[in-house]
Every structure is written in structure tokens, then in C-alpha cells.
Image (spheres, rainbow, N blue to C red):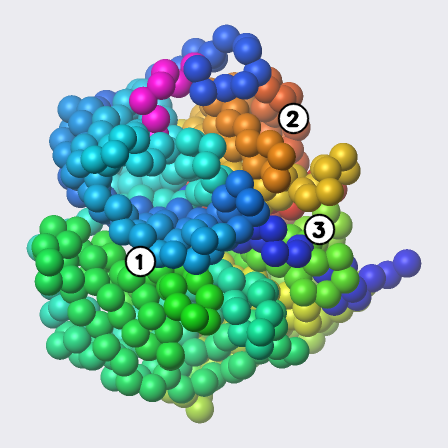
Amino acid sequence: MNLGREQIAPLQGFGFLCALTVVLTVSLAACGGGGSPAPPSPPGNFTLASLKGQYAFSLSGVDTTGAYIARMGSFTSDGAGNIISGLEDVLPLGTGVLSTVNFTGGSYQIQSTGRGTMTFQTSGGVGLQVIFDMQSPAGGFLIQSDKSATSSGTFSLQTPSGFANGSLLNQYVFTLSGISFSNSSVGPISMVGEINSDGNGNITGGLMDTNDGNFPSPATAVAIAPGTYQLDTNGNGTNFGRGTMSFAGRDFVFYIVDAAHILLLEEDALGGSAGHAVQQTAPPTQNSQFAGSFIFEVAGAGILGSKGPVVTVGRFTADGKGGLTAVTADDNNDGTHVHIKNGSNVSNATYSIDTDHAGSGRGTFSFTNGSTGTYSFTFYAASASQAFVQDTSKGYIAAGPLSLQGAGPFSLTNLAGDYVFNWGGVHLGTSTAVPLQEDYAGQYTLANANSNNISGVADFMQLGLSSSNLYGNISVSGKLTIQDDGTADNAYTFVLNSAPSTTLHFQVYFGSNSTAYLVCTDSSHTVAGAIRLQAP
């Protein structure tokens, strides 16, 4: 039986955002729950000194009650294993109270592979524990490891000289995902758009698309009324880059990474969400300026049928005239995997840059698969090579990144190296009434051009309403299978060799030899994430 895309739909409130859009004081070997000895660490060049400076971080997931939780902040490390200071904002929608937490200190460890643990101290004791994997001294992926929630995200080196209102002088595109309280109901929400900042504390306008699960269809291309922003004047602004912002009737906390990148955390009567804003640089204003091959990934939830998690990863080539070719995608909808391949089962593949809102970077693309229906998306481009994407297919609430794909071929020859990864989503166990949320982070090596074997280490957290388990320092093996020129249809097999032993199968889409998006194709996992080449 053929199922329409709107008929295979995803998850009911419990942590749908773990698929989205990626640090302890105990020893790494003691993190695991499987009792097996820790695997030997492969060689690497990271040291304590690799983590030195001020970093912004962002995490989102669910807490032990199944409620959405998000946190973001800033910390300073000394390059010798110590956290000097820090600040975070925590939004636990289970309690509905946004709190700001000061970190008075803490400590961290790093293995040579870039894998490490970190703990943040508050005046009352331990405030937050995470495990991280460094892509480079400029940042990497992290997962929460204190078992009070499962969440994952990223950390990035900040530029403290940019902690000023005047740094936010430009147009920014943003993506936000979270929970909506609209229409007297609770449901998932995705927001993408563009705002204009004047450098003097004013949001002068913008444009936004909202896909709210409490409404029958998305609100498209809605003008943003003027708003305001202000760095904190109590020291948190100049010390950590923290401030507050209001636009589109919503209230946010923000942290400045640098003038081109800010973190956003919403908490107001309309709900709660988290995301990023990045500076626009010459976004496309007509179809001819949006040309080339792109990869994309969206993750979130469905609002029809079984209401489970959904992730879609794919690629296409834009011809500069409004047409798409070489469309390939993999969709995991609540454990149902569909592979979409350009040819007889793909039709009506088109895109359009929004000329009615010139300069906003807004555009749309869509394609139809013969068995599962039409896939439609809205995007806001930061440039001709980068955008934030919102899934507007019927019954879907999902969002993620879109990136220009470098020229192939991708092969074992140019892909060999050391990588970090982060993926998250839902383990669709049949023995529990509520599926397990899970977040993974790790590091692996693809040895050389003569072998497709990978080896490394992973940490992952699984959380349900009745269990909370951290599996640490788990050895990873597996294989990468390259198809044709490597621009699509590649397969990764990851084997987690203990606690518990698990094999995960992925379809992977390379943007370059240094970055890729991937989606799990197993019926028991709706999981997606990213892989990035390390640069110690």
C-alpha cells in the first residue's frame, strides 16, 4: 500500500526536537553503563590547551518528564583544565520558568582525539555536565551527560570585542524550533525568517514564515513589525555577550558569538524555542543567482496520524532557471524509510526565489515522489551558498540547514581523515509506551584510501519517562560505502560495540570532504545529524 507523505506522520509532544538540528568530572571510562573496558584512544593532537578562550554554547532536548528543554550560554576556559567563569539561560518548559545561572568555575578533560568532559560549578554545587568532541579549537559538538535531561548541540569560540549593540548592524536570517502554546493547544513550531538590525538597539523590520502545529497551514512571508534589542547592562553583556531582544511579538535572550552569528532563546506566553541567526551576505534575489548543487537536512515532528519524529536529508541541483535536477533524498518518518531517487519517481521539481520580497533571501523549492507525495520547503538564504530551511509539506513541522555542495567526486581518497559526529532523535522501541529520546556524539577515523573501515568512540544518552541511561566511551566500528561519484546514495554503517551493542545504518550526503548530513534508515531509529572533519 502506498502511503501519502501526510499519512505516515510523526510524534506527539515527547521530545520531537531531539532530532534537530551538535563534559564531566568523572573519568571517561566510568561514564558507560555496559561494564566493558574502555577502548584505546586512537592518536590525535588535541590537548588541554586546545580549549582556551571564551565559547558560546547551545543545547536542546527533553527533560525527564518529556518536556522540551533548551539552554544556551557562555563560558571561559583557561587552556589548563579549568573553567574560569560562565553564564547560561535555561528554559525548562516543564516548569515554564526561564532561569539565568552563573557558573563560578569548573573543570574539563580532553583526550588526544578531541573527546572530553566538562563540568560547570555554581555557588550551590554542580550546575551542568557535558561530554564534548572538538572539531577544532574553535568549537565542536556536545551532549548533556548529567542525566537530568537528554540534549545536544554545539559550542563555538566567541569574539568578546564584538560584545556591543553596535556589532548587530546588518540583516540576519534565523531559524527557531520549539513548542507553541498558540490556539489554546501545545504543539511543535518552526520559524524561519530575516530581521534587520540598525546597530542602535532597534529591529527595523523583517520577514518570517511560521509553521505552527496548532494551525492547519503555515503562515507564509509575514512582515515583522519593528522591535528592539539590548545587551545586558549588569555586566552580563560585556562579559558574556548576553542580551534581550523582541520582535514578531516574541521575547528572546541572545548570546553573541561574533558579529556574524548570534544564539537565540525564546521564552514568552506564546511558547519556547531555540535557534541561531547568521548575517546575510549578498543573498540571491532572482533564480539565476541560486544555482549549483545543494544538500539539506530537516528534522522535527508530524502533526497527523501517529505523530512521530521525522527527518529528511537530500540533495538537488538548481539550474538557475527555476528547475531542479538530480534530486535524491531519504525520509525517515516515524521509522518508515523512503528513498527518493531522481528519475521516474520524481516529478515537478522546481524552485523560486521570492522577488516580491527582494533582498530577504526567501525562496521555496519542492518535488513530488511517486509513492509518497509532494515535499515542499521554504528557505531563507544567508548567502548564495547557505540557508535555513523549513519543511512545509502537509502534516510536517521540521527545519534545518541547506548548504552548497562542493564539486565531486567524493571518494575514499579525499574522505580519509578524522571526524567528529553528532546525531539525535528517537529510538522507536516497541516495549515502551513512549519512545526513547537519544543523543549521540563521538569521534572516528576513516583510515586511508585503501579501506572503507571506520573506528572510533561514541557517547550517547537515552532517556524515557522511566529510564535515563548514559553510555560512555563506547568503541565504534563500521564502514563507509561510496556510490558512483559520492554526491548522493552513500551508506554508513556504525556499530556500537557495547552497552548496548547496536548497529545503525545511515544514508550520508557529503557537502565537501569536511562536512556531511546523514539520516538513519532503520525502522527502530528516527535519527539524523552531521559529520565534520577535525582540524586540531
CA gap between label 2 and label 3 equals 19 Å
According to the picture, the residue beneath numbered tag 2 turns out to be: 502
Q: Nearer the viewer, residue 443 or 324?
A: 443
Queried whether the magenta region covers residue 111, the answer comes back as: no
> Which residue is the extreme one toward the bottom?
356
Q: Is residue 128 left or right of residue 433?
A: left
- Quarter occupied by residue 91: bottom left
Left or right of residue 222: residue 44: left
Locate residue 419, reporting x and y percent: 42, 33
Q: Which residue is mark 1?
A: 263
The location of residue 507, given as percent across then percent down, is 62, 44
| Cα distance in 3D space between marks 3 and 1 | 29 Å
Task: Check disc 3 and give the amino acid type.
Answer: Asp
Q: Secondary structure at mark 1?
A: strand
Q: Nearer the viewer, residue 411 or 223?
A: 223
Q: Earlier along the polypeptide chain: callout 3 or callout 1? A: 1
Q: Are marks 2 and 3 in contact (CB under 8 Å)?
A: no
Answer yes or no: is residue 394 visible.
yes
Q: Residue at x 52, y 69 (%)?
A: 181
Q: Secondary structure at mark 3?
A: loop
Task: Specify the amino acid type for callout 2.
Answer: Thr
Identified by mark 1, the residue type is Leu
Query: What residue sits right under mark 3 in the picture?
Result: 334
Q: Earlier in the sequence, mark 2 or mark 3?
A: 3
Label annotation for residue 344 = none
Give the SS element for disc 2. Answer: strand
- Looking at the image, which residue is at 23% across and 54% down? 257
Q: Residue at x 60, y 32 (%)?
A: 467
